[in-house]
Image: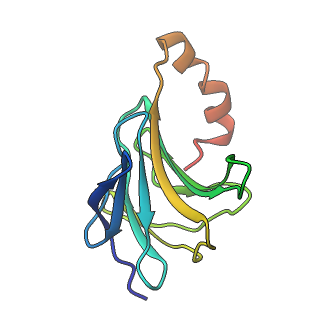
Amino acid sequence: MRIPSLAVAAVSGGVLLAQAASAIDCPAAGTSVTVVPDASGGVSLGVISDPDAVCTLILLATADGAGGETFIPFGRSYSGYNWEGVSPTNQVFACAGGSCAAALPAPDAGQEYRLGSDRHSATPAQRGSRLPIHGPLGPAN
């Protein structure tokens, strides 16, 4: 199965649009990219290397008439770890060479995939507090 990558194609209404062509990295913190999978649902996403950042892939749905939005998380990459599926979808990612490929289900009308990122900072003491969790259980990658 061929799973192509994505590339930024255009800007529309302040949102970057991505289409199948070449690998796509996470956008700058606080922004999002609309991800348009190829005809077979294939995407390839870069692994975020910043230790203080997280990148997420969600399926966004705009509610008809109400103006609200709901989202379903599909995956995340953080602190240099490969992409991993998250609940409730538990999307499967195949990772190699700093990028991860996935086959996404086709979105319904009024839905779109979004790739977004956020940054946080942690003090050395906060980072050290992760040891009790990562020690016995290991990091979530």
Outermost residue toward the bottom in this view: 1
Q: Nearer the viewer, residue 35 or 99?
A: 35
* Residue 41 vertical placement versus 44 (above, below): below
Rendering colour mode: rainbow
Image mark count? 0
Instruction: Measuring from the top left, give residue 56's x and y in whole percent.
Output: 52, 48
Q: Residue at x 58, y 68 (%)?
A: 92
* Residue 60 image offset from top left, x and y in percent: 60, 56
Q: Position of residue 87 (x, y in %)?
A: 71, 55
Viewport quadrant of the N terminus: bottom left
Q: Determine whether 29 is above or below 129 in the image.
A: below
Q: Residue at x 45, y 53 (%)?
A: 82
Residue at the extreme front of the image, as rendered: 65
Spot occupied by residue 40 in the image (x, y as percentages of width and height): 47, 85
Image point (49%, 17%), residue name: 122
Residue drawn at x 60%, y 64% is 111
Q: Is residue 19 above or below residue 76?
A: below
